[in-house]
Image (spheres, grey):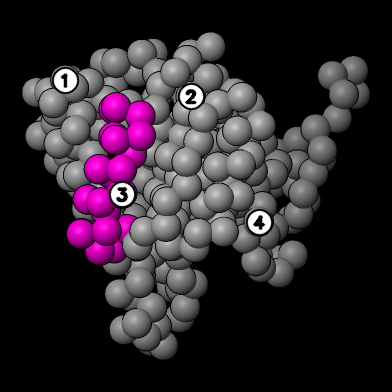
Amino acid sequence: MRLQDKIVLVTSAQNPCSHAIAMGFAREGAHCVVIDDQAGKAEQLADEVRSFESRAVAFQYDVTKKSQVEEGVRRAVAEFGRIDVLFNCSAISHETDFLNITEKAFNECIDRGPKAYFLVAQAVGKQMAEQRSGKIINLSTTDARLGSGESAGNSAAYSSIDSMTRAMAQALGFYGVNVNSLVCGPMDSSSGTAEEEGERLRRIPLGRLSKSQDLVGAAIFLATDDSNFVTGESLYVDAGYSNAAVTEDSFRPAWARTWGKFEVPPHNK
């Protein structure tokens, strides 16, 4: 197992990707500390981690509050003696027309995104600096690179997370700590009409939106020794969505011209 007896701190049980990635860490032998402002959600995820015969504890803390973050990290170290991996995943998204997004919604994007990531990474970074080792993974989305009319708050938050990731990597690399961001593309769990989903799919030649499970392998890579010489990077797991314009139909196979989902035909077709 690639994460045997490593200690992972997960900062949200509510993010759509946190469950799949925490389960992936547990399958590789990791033990988990789950922090969430909803105790029930944190305990539920911790209980599922235990089903892999891993140890897990759940703490109720608000990761936007410095004093609570520091107390949560202190308890995690008291419980396990160290923190090997931090998975920052508390960021949220608000999809609201730019002219109508509220100050409250915008502030929530910033508070639960770059502010919380900063507070937790700083507290955990001090522990990792003492250990002279550690991996910090900041979950982000393609809104860090792309802009759309409803993503002002998201774009501000996730672009900040990506640039802060590079700064943290430079600051903590002296202590043997790697810092990277894991960037997900459009998810199949997002709300939207069939036409809106189809519009996104036109930029994804693999023919489907991403699932949370698609991020697991990349997260494990960033958490293990396989990524020891990777830091300050943003690893995009988006099937090329953020780099693609729409390929015109005349350059597509006939079965890939659909506006919605398609299936790749068998090799002999």
Could you say whether the residue bearing mark 4 is in a helix, strand or loop?
loop
Q: CA distance from mark 1 to mark 3?
A: 21 Å
The answer to whether residue 205 of the structure is visible from this angle is no
Q: Is residue 46 left or right of residue 105?
A: right
Q: Residue at x 66, y 68 (%)?
A: 192
What mark, if any, has residue 189 been given in the picture?
4
Q: Nearer the viewer, residue 114 or 58?
A: 58
Tell me the residue that label 2 is attached to.
30
Hey, what amino acid is under mark 4?
Ser
Q: Earlier in the sequence, mark 2 or mark 1?
A: 2
Q: Is residue 92 left or right of residue 172?
A: right
Q: Is residue 200 visible?
A: yes
Q: Secondary structure at mark 2?
A: loop
Query: How far is the residue under mark 2 from the one under mark 1?
Result: 19 Å
Residue 234 place in picture, x, y as percent: 33, 37
Mark toward the viewer: 4 or 1: 1
Residue 150 position by quadrant: bottom left
Give the residues in magenta. 63-82
Given residues 67 and 167, the one toward you in this image is: 67
- First in residue order: circle 1 vs circle 3: 3
Q: Nearer the viewer, residue 144 or 63?
A: 63
Query: How dense is the environment of label 4, judged by Cα within 10 Å: few (below 14), some, or many (20 and up)?
Result: few
Regarding mark 1 in the picture, which secondary structure is present there? loop
- What residue does disc 3 label? 72
Give the CA distance from mark 3 to mark 4. 30 Å
Locate residue 24, reporting x and y percent.
57, 29
Query: Mark 3 and 4 residues: CB-CB less than 8 Å, in contact?
Result: no
Residue at screen point 71% across, 69% down: 193
Q: Residue 90: x, y in percent?
A: 40, 55
Residue 131 sits above or below residue 247 on the image: above
The answer to whether the residue labelled 2 contacts the one labelled 4, judged by CB atoms less than 8 Å apart, is: no
Name the residue tied to disc 1.
132
